[in-house]
Amino acid sequence: MFSTIRIGAIALLACAMAPAVTLAEEADYSAVEAKLRELAPSATSIALSETPIEGLLQAQIGNEFVYVSRDGTYLLQGTMFNMDTRENVTDQAKSVLRKELIVDLDPAQQITFTPEDPDYELLVFTDIDCGYCRKLHDQVEAYNDQGIAIHYLAFPRAGVGSHSFEKFVSVWCNDDQQSALTLAKGGDEPVPMQCDNPIESQYELGREVGVTGTPALLTPDGQLIPGYMSPEDLRARLDSLAAAN
């Protein structure tokens, strides 16, 4: 049910975000954590914090978020929305985690298509054989014309060792990665190559940040935009996100 990742950084992040609690609340937290550990015995760390709803705590276990009553009786899985502001409270918490996971990524480990002076930078988890990934890449120049830089990370949906995975390795090992990726997304079979590469680590990173399908677009502040969007619609979406921050 629950996975554990980069526990030390996550625990520190949760502590930094959580408001100050009283000794009584700390006691409540200990009792709730004990119950959660019965459900997730392999979890190395569990971080609890307050929510806007009285009596309901947020529990961060690995890269997953659930909600639990303060007495530890009830557990809820799902998304919390603020109906007044239309904000996705759960995704806001996940965005903080995603930002922590991507903050130290090396740009040299990405295959990038960018205008000279982009307004927006996007990480795009992509699969060579995904239809909508190919549609997005067919329009990569149009995204650049909209002021959007595309930084590709590999997410072969069939997993490590699959044919799609090996295609990405071959693309990465090519001297001209941009052209090799364009040809592969057009249906050409890359010349098989092997070299040191980040394909597996990028795939695992995608799983950690919550990628379940491709393309998956991730902003520098950790907001995840799942699925294909046209260049015009994506620019409008990014403008809207920027205006809200």
Image (cartoon, grey):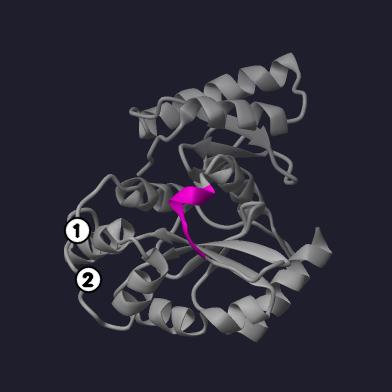
Q: Residue 171: where, in percent of width, then height?
A: 30, 64
Occupied quadrant, residue 9: top right
* Residue at the disc numbered 1: 193
Label 2 neighbourhood size at 10 Å, few (<14), some (14-19), many (20+)? some
Task: Tell me, yes or no, whether the highlighted magenta stretch contains residue 108.
Answer: yes
Camera-side residue: 61 or 173? 173
- Asked whether the viewer can see residue 229, the reply is no
Q: Are marks 2 and 1 in contact (CB under 8 Å)?
A: yes
On the rendered image, what quadrant is the N terminus found in?
top left
Q: Residue 111: where, in percent of width, then height?
A: 45, 61
Residue at the image position 52 percent from the left and 42 percent from the top:
74
Secondary structure type for disc 1: loop
Residue at the image position 26 percent from the left and 57 percent from the top:
169
- Asked whether the viewer can see residue 21, the reply is yes
- Count of numbered circles on the image: 2
Task: Tell me, yes or no, whether the highlighted magenta stretch contains residue 158.
Answer: no
* Residue at the disc numbered 2: 190
Q: Residue 134: where, in percent of width, then height?
A: 39, 80
Label 1 neighbourhood size at 10 Å, few (<14), some (14-19), many (20+)? some
The Cα atoms of the two marked residues, 2 and 1, are separated by 8 Å
Which portion, as a residue range, is magenta? 107-112
